[in-house]
């Protein structure tokens, strides 16, 4: 290769790598103030992988610095490690954003019933298009509560065991979440904040996180929080929500649960209890099913 061309390529790689690194850092610092920057924070892992590939364009000492930064992020992405719980001692929960416009509704319901879970927590399920499937689930799960409307913010909770209470609350009178209290002082929260696709919805999501974090923090029971949070652990907004509510993650930070960008939007968080969580294979939704064991 011509020396001039090689030099020009290396200069461009160094320039774009540094620009990407600066952008990722700014996303961590300023995401709380400008929502488009938060979008980039979700792709921190992707960005670090790209920077690693381009790091050969730098001199050795700078290359080592980039390796330390990127490998640190990549290592953090695969924590925390989930523990092991026995099925017979645990409540089995299926958490699933079933996708409001799902074309294979009956197949999804058959799959869910085949999991033989104690609790089903389903977001984007409700309204006229889901009435038949709701009836089928109610035959197998005698206790349920939810918000059934023709909207992606519909949500349902089905349980084989009778909860002490099961309530649907609303943030800004629009966005619901479910709070169910079970025996042995356990509280389950099912969340689904709006996606931050524009400034208004990004602000509504901030309010949703703030108010639900306050509610969760003041709950004295053992707490499990599940659902499609439309956020990832790479975002400072997510981490602030987790800290303010006193929760910790049960699934590792980079586990992909949403297509097409394979981001870890579906989360499992807990406090004062034991939890094991894993994502199952893709079905007919753009989200993966999450299986949880809760003690």
Image (cartoon, grey):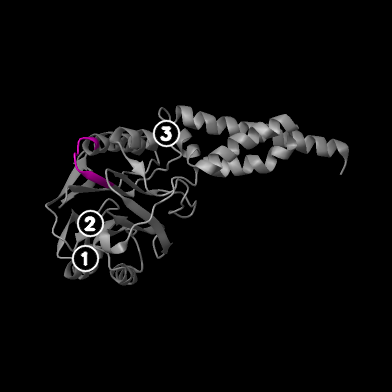
Distance between the alpha carbons at the discs numbered 3 and 2: 29 Å
Q: Which residue is drawn at 61% across and 44% down?
A: 49
> In this figure, which residue is indicated by the disc labeled 1?
134
Q: Nearer the viewer, mark 3 or mark 2?
A: 3
The answer to which of 292 and 289 lies nearer the viewer is 292
Mark 3 lies on a secondary structure that is helix
Within 10 Å of disc 2 (Cα), the crowding (few <14, some 14-19, many 20+) is many
Q: Is residue 43 visible?
A: no
Mark 2 lies on a secondary structure that is strand
Query: Is residue 76 on the magenta stretch?
Result: no
Relative to 219, is 29 above or below?
Answer: above
Distance between the alpha carbons at the discs numbered 1 and 2: 9 Å
Spot occupied by residue 82 in the image (x, y as percentages of width and height): 41, 51
> In this figure, which residue is indicated by the disc labeled 3?
236
Q: Residue at x 48, y 41 (%)?
A: 42
Left or right of 27, for residue 205: left
Mark 1 lies on a secondary structure that is helix
Decide which of tag 3 and tag 2 comes sooner along the chain: 2
Decide which of tag 1 and tag 3 comes sooner along the chain: 1
Spot occupied by residue 181 in the image (x, y as percentages of width and height): 16, 49
Which residue is most to the left? 164
Q: Any mark on residue 156, and which?
A: 2
The answer to which of 19 and 72 lies nearer the viewer is 72
Left or right of 13, for residue 219: left
Decide which of tag 1 and tag 2 comes sooner along the chain: 1
- Location of residue 127 by image quarter: bottom left
Q: Can residue 276 be seen in this view?
A: yes
Residue stretch rendered in magenta on the structure: 217-224
Q: Quadrant of the N terminus?
A: top right
């Amino acid at each position: 290769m011509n020396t001039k061309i090689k030099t020009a390529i290396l200069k461009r790689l160094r320039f774009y790598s540094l620009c990407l690194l600066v952008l990722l850092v700014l996303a961590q610092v300023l995401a709380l103030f400008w929502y488009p920057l938060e979008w980039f924070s979700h792709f921190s892992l992707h960005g670090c992988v790209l920077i690693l590939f381009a790091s050969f364009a730098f001199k050795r000492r700078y290359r080592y610095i980039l390796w330390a930064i990127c490998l640190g992020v990549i290592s953090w992405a695969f924590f925390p490690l989930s523990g092991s719980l026995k099925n017979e001692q645990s409540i089995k929960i299926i958490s699933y954003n079933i996708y409001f416009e799902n074309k294979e509704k009956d197949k999804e319901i058959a799959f869910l019933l085949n999991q033989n879970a104690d609790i089903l927590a389903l977001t984007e399920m409700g309204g006229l298009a889901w009435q038949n499937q709701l009836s089928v689930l109610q035959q197998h799960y005698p206790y349920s509560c939810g918000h059934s409307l023709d909207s992606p913010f519909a949500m349902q909770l089905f349980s084989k065991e009778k909860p002490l209470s099961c309530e649907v609350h609303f943030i800004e009178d629009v966005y619901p979440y479910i709070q169910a209290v079970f025996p042995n002082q356990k509280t389950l929260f099912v969340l689904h904040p709006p996606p931050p696709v524009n400034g208004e919805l990004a602000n509504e999501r901030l309010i949703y996180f703030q108010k639900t974090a306050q509610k969760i923090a003041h709950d004295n029971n053992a707490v499990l929080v599940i659902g499609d949070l439309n956020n990832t652990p790479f975002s400072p907004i997510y981490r602030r929500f987790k800290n303010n509510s006193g929760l910790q993650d049960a699934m590792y930070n980079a586990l992909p649960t949403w297509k097409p960008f394979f981001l870890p939007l579906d989360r499992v968080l807990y406090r004062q209890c034991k939890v094991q969580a894993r994502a199952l294979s893709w079905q007919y939704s753009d989200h993966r099913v999450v299986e949880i064991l809760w003690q």
